Amino acid sequence: MSYTRYSRSEWASLPKYISQDSITHLPNLLSDIELDAFYIPLASFIGILYRNHLKCKADLQHFFNKETKAIPFLVGVAGSVSAGKSTFSESIAQLFEGLPGSPKTTIVSTDQFLYKNEILEARELKDLKGFPESYDWKNLLHTLQTIKSGKSTDVPIYSHETYDILPDETQHVESPDILIVEGINTLQVGINGEDLPSLFDISLYLDAEEEDLFSWFWTRILQFKEKAKEDPSSYYHAFKDMPEEQLHQMAKTVWDTINGKNLREHILPTKEKADIIVKKASDHTINEIQISETLL
């Protein structure tokens, strides 16, 4: 796929159709500079595509003189472990509030379709968690198709603290105007040919150097460890007394044998399936964006 590249300054100079005054809850994890330079122009651009989606739907209803169910606009967000997909998705979702009509935006993570740990252990897939075979692709595809058809559904909830699917808890998804699906495998084809990328109206890939990705992974482990000190239910509680040097070595081993391997073999090859590639610097700021020429 061919892309047009925009530097940070070029992207920041593009029109901004969303004002910070129109947003009730501004993303609190981003600086005003980052919001203005990157996120608001991006949300404005996606907003144009969303309005085109609505207009096409209205035109077809008029053409056939037939009312049909509202169909949500699906946004796919892909990238490595620790690339910042959740923060990115939450920030964009909050900015969509400033679009005309304040569209209802819901976020679903593909982590919610990981097999439970007990199933992974029974299938000897515990050390392949995050690899394609560790996901319930059939349920993932069916759920997204259900939402895209305008129907409501319940989705499992995954906890990074317990490192497992939560028992007896679900996320109810009902009639979103925009659905953001974020995850490492968003642009992958499932093990039985499940074609997730074809469901998305627009897809993005968060790109970063592997050295930075590991650094962010390590920072996240330290944050989870700190939070888990007084929480025996947390997966990270077991590491509360482990010396930092030993924990760092363990994290490096996990990265080299699992996360980094998964990145190189299964995640990075999907980058050029994305309509938009977002290049992140070591401090999580955006220093380049690439737009597929099929959109321009």
Image (tube, rainbow, N blue to C red):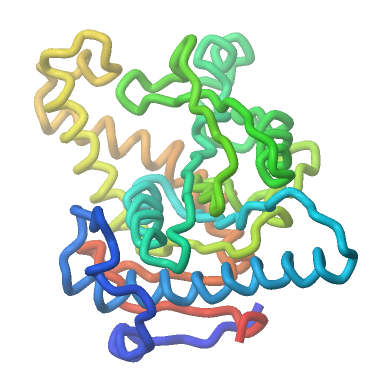
Q: Is residue 203 above or below residue 1?
A: above
Q: Residue 248: which quarter of the image? A: top left
Q: Nearer the viewer, residue 83 or 265?
A: 83
Q: Is residue 45 left or right of residue 208?
A: right
Q: Is residue 238 left or right of residue 58?
A: left
Q: Residue 208: which quarter of the image? A: bottom left
Residue at 20%, 63% (x, y): give it: 283
Q: Nearer the viewer, residue 241 or 48?
A: 48
Q: Residue furthest right?
A: 64
**Image spot of residue 31 (x, y percent):** 16, 65
Question: Where, quadrant-wise, is the N terminus in this rendering?
Answer: bottom right
**Image spot of residue 63 (x, y percent):** 87, 71
Question: Where, quadrant-wise, is the C terminus in this rendering?
Answer: bottom right
**Image spot of residue 39 (x, y percent):** 33, 69
Q: Nearer the viewer, residue 252 or 170?
A: 170
Q: Is residue 245 above or below residue 69?
A: above
**Image spot of residue 245 (x, y percent):** 12, 33
Residue at 55%, 34% (x, y): give it: 173
